[in-house]
Amino acid sequence: MAGWFLDVWVGYLVSLVMIQVRKRRSHRYSNWRETPATIVGVSWRELFWMERPVVEFVYAYHIEGGFYGGVDKKPFCFKSSAQNYASRFVKGDTLIVRVKPGEPEVSVVLDEDQEKMPELTKTYRG
């Protein structure tokens, strides 16, 4: 019983650290190019080790004549939060991704880019 309790608390701590790291990474990628990507799949699951829920996006995007894809994992502390977040997205929805200059196959999803999504999709769609 004590082992299970410790696993749960360590899982929460790991999730909290990962959430903070994700929030702070926007400065590192601020000069990367923004481009629209299409969600190919979205799911949530609980990791078996340290029981922490994660939402996973699989996406694809076109840039500079090439077709690329990526995966983004967003950590949560609670299963209900992960389920609720994942339910807001469906296959075919658009995400904004940041693409590394000179390496279009390297991309990242920033949470703050998704918050400004409505005005960006108008720009990208013309």
Image: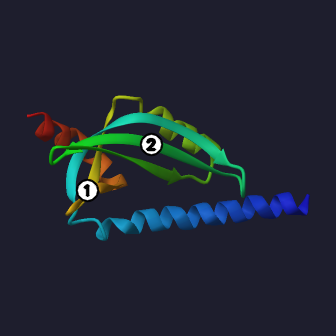
Q: Position of residue 102 (x, y in %)?
A: 20, 63
- Tell me the residue at 80%/64% (across/down): 6
Q: Please determine whether, in this image, residue 72 is positioned above or below residue 61.
A: below
Q: Position of residue 51 (x, y in %)?
A: 71, 52
In this view, which residue lies farthest toward the front? 66
- Give the numbered dot on residue 34: none
- Give the numbered dot on residue 57: 2
Q: Position of residue 11 (x, y in %)?
A: 68, 60
The colour scheme used to paint the residues is rainbow
- Tell me the residue at 43%/48% (across/down): 71
Crowdedness near tag 2: few (<14), some (14–19) or many (≥20) residues, C-alpha within 10 Å: many
- Do the residues under discs 2 and 1 have CB atoms within 8 angstroms? no
Crowdedness near tag 1: few (<14), some (14–19) or many (≥20) residues, C-alpha within 10 Å: many
The CA span between labels 2 and 1 is: 16 Å
- Tell me the residue at 50%/44% (across/down): 56
Kind of residue at badge 2:
Phe
Which residue lies under the disc numbered 1? 99
Q: Position of residue 107 (x, y in %)?
A: 32, 55
Q: Is residue 114 left or right of residue 17?
A: left
The image quadrant that residue 29 belongs to is bottom left
Kind of residue at badge 1:
Val
Q: Please determine whether, in this image, residue 58 is positioned above or below residue 22.
A: above
Q: How many marks?
A: 2
